[in-house]
Image (cartoon, rainbow, N blue to C red):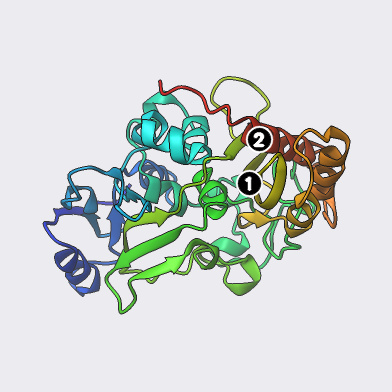
């Protein structure tokens, strides 16, 4: 690990000034710092300066509801804060459930929502120094001809990593907006936050190097739920994730927003499933099953991960059923 300086800043302007300074090589922002520490230990980055934005003053209540009903989460709110929030369980259970499903209790106590959104891929070819893959400036993705059990089944490459965030699919079905500082813009829809590998290999998001996420806003989605399928019950990376948000009137689904995770390089929207769910009765199990089965359409599995196309419709169906029942878990 190389030597580096750490700066604790008091304002976003001070953070941006340090990032743009020529005094340090490759400065980076640090909040919870969990993924950053992994990158430092694995030799994937060698910054000359860590700008600690965890010290920036946020609002008094990191999770609250505005007078107009809009929900707001501070960028530095931890996953544990979100998972325990009665406000999230009541008005956006999909967010609370996604936060609760991530990592382990120890990690959730430190990891922030902004860090969860912007964490780097967990692909072992990217994480191991000996593989000079596309994301590190190399000339090939090793997944198609190598061990690809946990890689993408949608997206078509050229890089076959999966997006690791659990909060990204959940926020996507909430039509969230990501509020930023450090540039000329104030916010960006979450649907525009990430880009596919064919639009840029060296990063996964569309923020500039100096932009800082300040908070996230979204509308209440009471009939919503999240489901993650794991190999084991203990801390493990999910094989497939599903987020669902429904508008239900008189026992009928009037509209649906469905997004998948852990199956593509970006949070993967499923418009066919959304269209098929529209106007279905919530007690029509056969038609609901048929609609959710469309989640596997147009998948392009690699040699070892076709099983994901069987798991994903199951995850979608469970998320839809939980959204219908609104059976958000009680705060822990």
Residue at the extreme front? 250
Task: Return the residue nearer the eye: 144 or 231.
Answer: 231
When asked about the image quadrant of residue 48, the answer is bottom left
Residue drawn at point x = 44 percent, y = 34 percent: 90
Rendered view: 59 above or below 224: below
Find residue 169 and report its horizontal and vertical position in percent. 57, 49
Picture disc at residue 193: none
In this image, 263 relative to 193: left or right? right
Asked which quadrant contains residue 308, the reply is: top right
Can residue 128 be seen from the camera position used here? no
Alpha carbons under labels 2 and 1: distance apart: 8 Å
The answer to whether the residue labelled 2 contacts the one labelled 1, judged by CB atoms less than 8 Å apart, is yes
Nearer to the camera, 164 or 189: 189
Q: Secondary structure at mark 2?
A: helix
Q: Which residue is mark 2?
A: 324
Relative to 17, does residue 248 appear above or below in the rendering?
above
Residue 109, given in percent of the width and then of the height, sits at: 34, 30
Q: Give the residue at x 84% y 38%.
A: 289
Q: Name the residue rendered at 48%, 31% in the picture.
A: 103
Q: Image point 79% across, 52% down: which residue?
A: 145
Q: Is any atom of residue 167 visible in this view?
A: yes
The 10 Å Cα crowd at callout 2, few under 14, some 14 to 19, many 20 or more, is many
What residue would you read off at disc 1? 246
Q: How many marks?
A: 2
230 lies above or below 203? above
- In the rendering, at what x and y percent does residue 253 appear? 71, 46
Report the side of 58 relative to 112 (left or right): left
Label 1's element? Answer: strand
């Amino acid at each position: 690990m190389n030597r580096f300086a750490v700066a604790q800043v008091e304002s976003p302007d001070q953070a941006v000034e340090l990032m743009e300074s020529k005094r340090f090589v490759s400065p980076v922002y640090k909040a919870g710092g969990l993924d950053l520490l992994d990158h430092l230990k694995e030799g994937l980055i060698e910054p000359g300066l860590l700008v600690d934005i965890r010290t920036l003053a946020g609002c008094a209540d990191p999770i609250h509801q505005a007078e107009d009903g809009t929900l707001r989460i501070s960028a530095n709110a931890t996953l544990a804060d979100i998972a325990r929030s009665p406000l999230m369980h009541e008005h956006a259970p999909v967010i609370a459930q996604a936060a609760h499903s991530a990592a382990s209790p120890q990690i959730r106590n430190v990891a922030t929502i902004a860090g969860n959104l912007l964490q780097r891929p967990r692909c072992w070819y990217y994480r191991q120094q000996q593989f000079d893959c596309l994301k590190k400036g190399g000339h090939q993705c090793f997944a198609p001809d190598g061990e690809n059990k946990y890689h993408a089944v949608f997206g078509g490459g050229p890089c076959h990593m999966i997006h690791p965030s659990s909060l990204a699919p959940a926020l996507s079905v909430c039509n969230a907006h990501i509020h930023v500082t450090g540039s000329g813009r104030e916010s960006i829809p979450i649907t525009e936050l990430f880009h596919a590998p064919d639009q840029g290999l060296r990063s996964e998001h569309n923020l500039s190097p100096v932009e800082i996420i300040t908070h996230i806003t979204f509308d209440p989605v009471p009939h919503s739920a999240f489901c993650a399928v794991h190999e084991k019950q203990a801390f493990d990376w999910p094989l497939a994730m599903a987020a669902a948000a429904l508008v239900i009137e008189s026992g009928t689904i009037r509209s649906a927003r469905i997004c998948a995770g852990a199956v593509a390089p970006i949070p993967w929207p499923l418009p066919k499933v959304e269209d098929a769910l529209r106007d279905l009765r919530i007690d029509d199990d056969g038609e609901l099953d048929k609609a959710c089965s469309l989640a596997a359409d147009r998948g392009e599995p690699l040699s070892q991960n076709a099983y994901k196309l069987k798991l994903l419709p199951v995850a979608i169906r469970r998320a839809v059923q939980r959204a219908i029942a609104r059976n958000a878990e009680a705060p822990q």
